[in-house]
Image (cartoon, coloured by chain):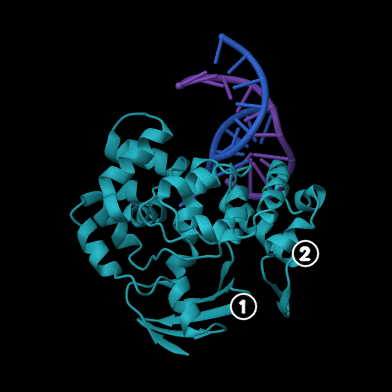
Chain colours: A cyan, B blue, C purple
DNA sequence: ACCCAGGATTTCA
DNA sequence: TGAAATCATGGG
């Protein structure tokens, strides 16, 4: 299936840190797993060769209906953001599965991206449904509920194993909680997410941004903290203050601005100095 | 051996 | 209420 796109770069999306099941299989050729399917994308310019999913699934997952050009134009008035955007102009905010995103970001706590990817892959291979060949879907909450803390620890999640077990137990007693709260206001949605074990402010923000389409939330991890302190606030402060600052500074699409900054985190400071 | 990673929880002052 | 200690684990 050929699809014409704007503001889309599969390499940048794969490396953006919001998803953990995309991998490079060649030059501008990537494979990812979502909706229980194996999706391959080969990009040449603005043309994608997409296989494995329907066009509706593709459009929803990659947030195709949103006009990123307009957002980038808006943010280009900010000198720092302008440079960040120039490095990741094809980034988009994905709409990923609620449950998979929640568990993945519980695993992300005090962790690094390669290890998160490894754990998510092992959990899928051992406890998820086989799709074909060596490709497995991430387990749903019922499948993951049957997994013990030791089995999870064997996937390299460490002390987070207990959080996953407890969170699954809570969700199993209220199967549609995540869908329900995705329609709540940011404040109420976040309050519900914070009631789950292993979910603090940052993980809650990531779940809302990367799976619920709440693009105005501004997750603050160690990278964003450093970057914001050095480039915007010009002093050391705390995470809560940075989150508040980010939302007021960047407004309606603060989460998208955050992704541009996060993707550019390693090079943006060199450019500006 | 030490520090760090898309932090959260627990403990202590 | 808020700052420190603790939590697994692999890589630099």
Do the residues at pointers 1 and 2 share their chain?
yes
For this view, does A11 lie left or right of residue B1? left
Question: Relative to residue A141, is residue A106 drawn left or right?
Answer: left
Q: Is residue A125 above or below residue A38?
A: above
Q: Is residue A175 above or below residue A228?
A: below
SS at mark 1 in the image: strand
Q: Chain of mark 1?
A: A
User: How many C-alpha atoms fall within 10 Å of the one at disc 2: few (<14), some, or many (≥20)?
Assistant: some
Task: Please state the horizontal and vertical placement of residue A32, each as a whole percent of the image.
Answer: 57, 72
Contact check, label 1 and label 2, Cβ < 8 Å: no
Distance between the alpha carbons at the discs numbered 1 and 2: 17 Å
Residue that carries the numbered disc 1 in the rendered image: A37
Of labels 1 and 2, earlier in sequence is: 1
Please state the chain letter of the residue tagged with numbered disc 2 in the rendered image. Answer: A
At horizontal 75% and vertical 56% (from top left) the residue drawn is A145
Residue that numbered label 2 is attached to: A126
| Residue drawn at 47 percent across, 81 percent down | A56
The quarter holding residue A127 reads bottom right
Q: Is residue B3 left or right of residue A42?
A: right
Q: Left of A77 or right of it: where is A16?
A: right
Q: As displayed, is residue A14 above or below residue C2?
A: below
Q: Position of residue A244 (x, y in %)?
A: 34, 39
Q: Against A263, is A29 above or below?
A: below
- Front residue (pair A244, A220): A244
Residue at the location (73% across, 48% down)? A165
Regarding residue A273, the answer to whether it shows in the image is no
Q: Residues within 10 Å of mark 1 (few under 14, many from 20)?
A: some
Is A168 in front, or is A268?
A: A168
């Amino acid at each position: 299936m050929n699809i014409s796109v704007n503001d889309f770069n599969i390499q940048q999306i794969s490396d953006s840190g919001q998803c953990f099941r995309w991998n490079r299989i060649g030059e501008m050729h990537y494979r990812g797993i979502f909706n229980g399917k194996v999706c391959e994308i080969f990009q040449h310019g603005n043309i994608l060769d997409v296989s494995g999913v329907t066009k509706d699934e593709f459009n929803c997952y990659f947030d195709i209906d949103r006009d990123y050009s307009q957002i980038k134009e808006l943010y280009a008035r900010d000198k720092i953001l302008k440079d960040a955007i120039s490095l990741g102009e094809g980034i988009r905010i994905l709409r990923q599965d609620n449950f998979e995103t929640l568990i993945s970001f519980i695993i992300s706590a005090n962790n690094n991206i390669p290890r998160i990817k490894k754990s998510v892959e092992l959990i899928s291979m051992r406890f998820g449904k086989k799709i074909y060949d060596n490709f497995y879907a991430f387990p749903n909450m019922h499948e993951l509920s049957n997994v013990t803390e030791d089995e999870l620890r064997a996937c390299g999640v460490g002390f987070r194993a207990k959080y996953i077990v407890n969170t699954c137990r809570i969700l199993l007693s209220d199967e549609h909680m995540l869908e329900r709260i995705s329609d709540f206001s940011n404040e109420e949605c976040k309050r519900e997410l914070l009631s789950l074990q292993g979910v603090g402010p940052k993980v809650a923000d990531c779940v809302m941004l990367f799976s619920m389409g709440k693009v105005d939330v501004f997750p603050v991890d160690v990278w964003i903290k450093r970057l914001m302190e050095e480039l915007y606030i010009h002093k050391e402060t705390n995470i809560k203050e940075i989150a508040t600052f980010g939302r007021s500074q960047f407004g309606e699409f603060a989460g998208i601005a955050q992704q541009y900054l996060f993707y550019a985190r390693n090079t943006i400071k060199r450019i500006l100095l």
